[in-house]
Structures are given as C-alpha cells and as structure tokens.
Image (spheres, helix red, strand yellow):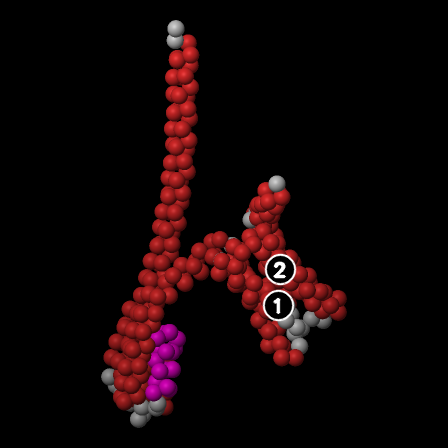
C-alpha cells in the first residue's frame, strides 16, 4: 500500500513539472533573468533599482533551485540520465558560487542561465540536438577547410609575402585569408592593395573564395539541413511506431474480448441445450 501511495505521489509530481503552466513559468523566469542581467551592464542611477537587481537575481536563482529539486524528486535516478538535466544542473550550480574572491569570474558566466531556454523549449532543443548530430559530418568538412587554408596560406606567403605585410608570415596570411573568406572588405582592403604589386593576384583570391566561401561553407549548411530533416524523420517514425503499438494493443484487447464473448456464448449454449 505504501509503495503504491508513494508511486502515485511521484506520478502526480512528474505530471506537475511537465505541465505547460510550469514550463511556461520557468521560461518566463529565464527571460526575466536575461533582462535583469542585461540591466547590470548599464549604469543604474536609481538607488532602488540598484538594490532590487541583486534581490531579483537571488530570488530567480532560488526558483531555479526549487525547480531542479522538484524534478530530482519527481524523476529520481532518471533525472541524471538526461544530458539536458545535467546541463541545467551545471548552469544553476555555477550560479550558486559567491561573486567574490576566486569566483569573481563566474559572475560573468551567470548569463549562461539564458541558455536554459534550450532545455525548456522543445523546439529549440530539437535544433540543438540536430546540430550536435551534425558535428561528425561537420568535422570532416572542417578538416577539408583547414587543409585548404594551410595550402592557401603557404602559397599566399610565397607569392605575396615579399611585397605585402598582410602575407609576411604564415600566421598573417592565414588571418588575412580568413578575412577574405568572410567577404568582409576583401576587395578594397586585401585584393586591390595586393594587385598593385601583383597584378594577377585577383585570380588567387577568386579561386580561394569559390573553394571556401561558396563551396566548403555551403557544405556546412547542407549537413545541418540534412541533420534537421533526419531528426524530423526520426520523430515521425517514432510517432508512427508509437501509434502502431497503441493500435496493436487495442487490437489485442478487442481480440481478447471477442474470445471471451465467444467462450461465454459457448457456455450459454451448453447450459440451455436439453
């Protein structure tokens, strides 16, 4: 009896922490926390506001602690099986350190609480999970990009290093080519000054831009989009499998009912047979 009571009490608590009202309340607190942390970056002239911000921060942290405590009690050991729960626990744990002494640097890390929106809002969590799933594919693209960068930086240093300080060393060439890849002022700040001493430098920059900005970087977009689609298809398949399982359960129950009815009819016929 005690076990059933405890189980039902925990189920009620799980239902409470998973309700939209509770989730929306936590989301509102996270957004409020983002506003208060942003206000701390501005010079506050009102004394009452300067006193209220630390108090609001302490109240918000207390709410986060209560929220996680309720979830730990509700889910029990299952709480620690979720990576998102660990993420929330670490973020809130950092907020509990004092803002003095060796922990002063952690004061700036309190803004990380805003990232809890990823774990609270399912749609944002799906995007992050899709990005994490795309990391193995992106690592290969990063390796290709790094190889292109290294080869291009060596070539640029050999070709333009004697006349342009932007390409004087391998590191300087790599940084300059990174600017070229981002297409930020590459023509006026990099290409044209180099072409004054090296007229055919435009060919090098055009090939580099086509290979990096237009080809390799677009591969990142393709991998991320493919991961998002794969995540969507996986959810559809999971939903379909769940629906099929529920339908199969209903069919099994219906079949059991039919067998029971058939058995009762046979017993009734046997009873009324002369």
Relative image position of residue 227 (x, y in whole percent):
36, 58
Residue 145: x percent and y percent? 31, 74
Can residue 63 be seen in this snapshot? yes
162 is higher (above) or lower (below) than 12: below
Instruction: Name the residue carrying label 1.
Output: 95
Quarter of the image where the C terminus is located: top left
Quarter location, residue 128:
bottom left
Element type at marker 2? helix
Residue occupying the point 28% across, 72% down: 210
Residue in the picture at 39% in, 75% down = 184
Q: Is residue 231 magenta?
A: no
Residue at (34% x, 80% y) in the render: 177
Q: Which residues are magenta?
A: 170-187
Question: Which residue is tagged 2?
Answer: 64
Q: Residue furthest right?
A: 48
Earlier in the chain: of badge 2 and badge 1, it is: 2
Residue 234: image location, x then y, percent:
37, 51
Q: Are marks 2 and 1 in contact (CB under 8 Å)?
A: yes
Q: Secondary structure at mark 1?
A: helix
């Amino acid at each position: 009896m005690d076990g059933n009571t405890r189980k039902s009490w925990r189920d009620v608590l799980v239902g409470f922490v998973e309700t939209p009202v509770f989730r929306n309340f936590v989301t509102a607190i996270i957004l409020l926390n983002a506003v208060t942390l942003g206000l701390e970056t501005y010079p506050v002239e009102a004394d009452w506001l300067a006193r209220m911000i630390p108090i609001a921060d302490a109240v918000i942290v207390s709410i986060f602690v209560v929220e996680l405590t309720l979830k730990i009690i509700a889910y029990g050991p299952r709480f620690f099986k979720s990576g998102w729960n660990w993420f929330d626990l670490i973020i809130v744990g950092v907020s509990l350190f004092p803002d003095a002494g060796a922990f002063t640097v952690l004061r700036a890390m309190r803004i990380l609480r805003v990232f809890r929106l990823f774990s609270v809002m399912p749609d944002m969590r799906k995007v992050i999970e899709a990005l994490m799933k795309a990391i193995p594919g992106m690592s290969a693209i990063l390796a290709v990009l790094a190889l292109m960068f290294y080869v291009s930086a060596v070539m640029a240093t050999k070709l333009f290093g004697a006349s342009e300080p932007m390409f004087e060393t391998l590191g300087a060439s790599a940084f300059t080519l990174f600017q070229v890849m981002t297409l930020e002022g590459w023509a006026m700040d990099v290409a044209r000054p180099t072409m004054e001493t090296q007229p055919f430098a435009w060919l090098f920059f055009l090939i580099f831009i086509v290979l990096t900005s237009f080809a390799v970087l677009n591969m990142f977009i393709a991998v991320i989009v493919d991961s998002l689609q794969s995540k969507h298809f996986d959810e559809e398949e999971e939903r379909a499998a769940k629906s099929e399982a529920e339908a199969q359960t209903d069919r099994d129950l219906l079949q059991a009912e039919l067998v029971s009815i058939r058995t009762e009819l046979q017993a009734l016929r046997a009873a009324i047979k002369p």
